[in-house]
Amino acid sequence: MLHRLSLRVLPQLNLLVTDQPVRKRKRLVMLAPGLVAFGIYRLLKDVLPLSEPLVLLGLSGCVSALAAIWGYRQGRGLSLQESFHQDGLRQWAWIVGWIGVAYGMQLSLLVLAILQVFVGYDFLLHPEGPAMMAMIIPCTSVTRDAFEIGLVQRLAHEGTVVPTFPNGDPLRSWIPQQLPEVMKWGGLGIVGGILSSWMVFGFGLGSWQPILQSVLVPVIVASISLLAFFAGEALFEQEEAKRRPHTWLSCLWFWLWPSLTFALTYFLVLIGIAVYVIRIEQISQFGFVTIAASTGFVMTLYSLFFGWRKSYEEHLVTIPENIQRCPFVMGILQQSKTPESVPPLVPHGDLVK
């Protein structure tokens, strides 16, 4: 879900995909794939064994892949043939394989895990309702994200400055350059996740462990992630201008979204993998500790990177005032003046310091 975080945390990307005309068109684009997913489910529920988790996930991945193609095509504004010629095989493989199939399956697992942990609506016992939701919700979400990515790609080709394309390449290039900080904060995230999960087990209440773990562990991980975000800012700004202060409100917003929201999301997706893919009937203490450690590592790594990358983008391009409408950015960014000029478009691969 790195692309989703990129599209909402990084100021320039968020500005491009949350413009009011874009929002209106995006709602229309998202409508059709959700209805199609519902129709496909109704047609195939008596043909395929959709009460089997792997079959459901496979179908959800295939439908989400089609939704990704549709969404990206609408955002890109070109025919599929022209887009494939301009964007290349690697880009399309990422859109279809990762944003479509893999991301769609992750969202299906998230839906199933939420229903089981917080609602007590277990897919294995009552497959029809959860299965339908696990088809429709991922399909619409994948369409939204693919549309936004296609829009970003189109604007970049038209000359708009896009410092960070949300395909993960900047993160992979950045990790070797900041390996000591990555190891330090990643280790802290792992330790924090392990200790928080272990403390929850100290409460007892075995039947309540899934919901207690899902609530309390993300709270600790989100707090560490917030600190990692500030540390990432400091990595870039230690030799630049004096670091700007943060308000309590901006810290609270960022802690709630994306830190807490995505910590909970990753935690539940991993629970979904354990229950519906590996088919563990009751997750053990070791299983919850492993899930907590994995969540802690991923969230602190991403937060550290986004803190660094946000500071980098602020020095690269002027952030206009209307970006302040984003709640988790509010107070983090200083009020900026109307941009006088922006630098020329720089290829994606040349943007990582």
Image (spheres, rainbow, N blue to C red):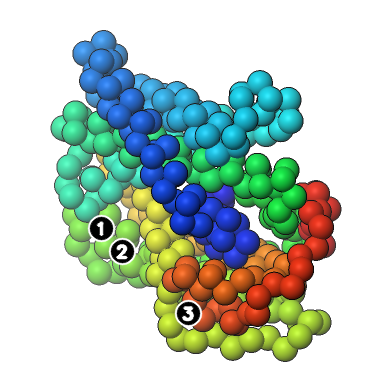
Q: Are the residues at dot 3 and dot 2 in contact (C-beta closer than 8 Å)? A: no
Residue at x 22%, y 53% (from the top left corner): 118
Which corner quadrant of the image does residue 339 belong to?
Answer: bottom right
User: Pointers 1 and 2 in contact (CB under 8 A)?
Assistant: yes
Q: CA distance from mark 1 to mark 3?
A: 28 Å
For this rendering, which residue is in front, 278 or 89? 89
Residue 292 in sight:
no
- Mark 2 = which residue? 215
Helix, strand or loop at disc 1? helix
Residue at 46% across / 56% down in the picture? 20
Q: Which residue is painted at 25% across and 31% down in the image?
A: 132
Disc assigned to residue 24: none
Distance from Cα at disc 3 to Cα at disc 2: 22 Å
Q: Which residue is mark 1?
A: 211
What kind of residue is marked 2? Val
Between discs 3 and 2, the one toward the N terminus: 2
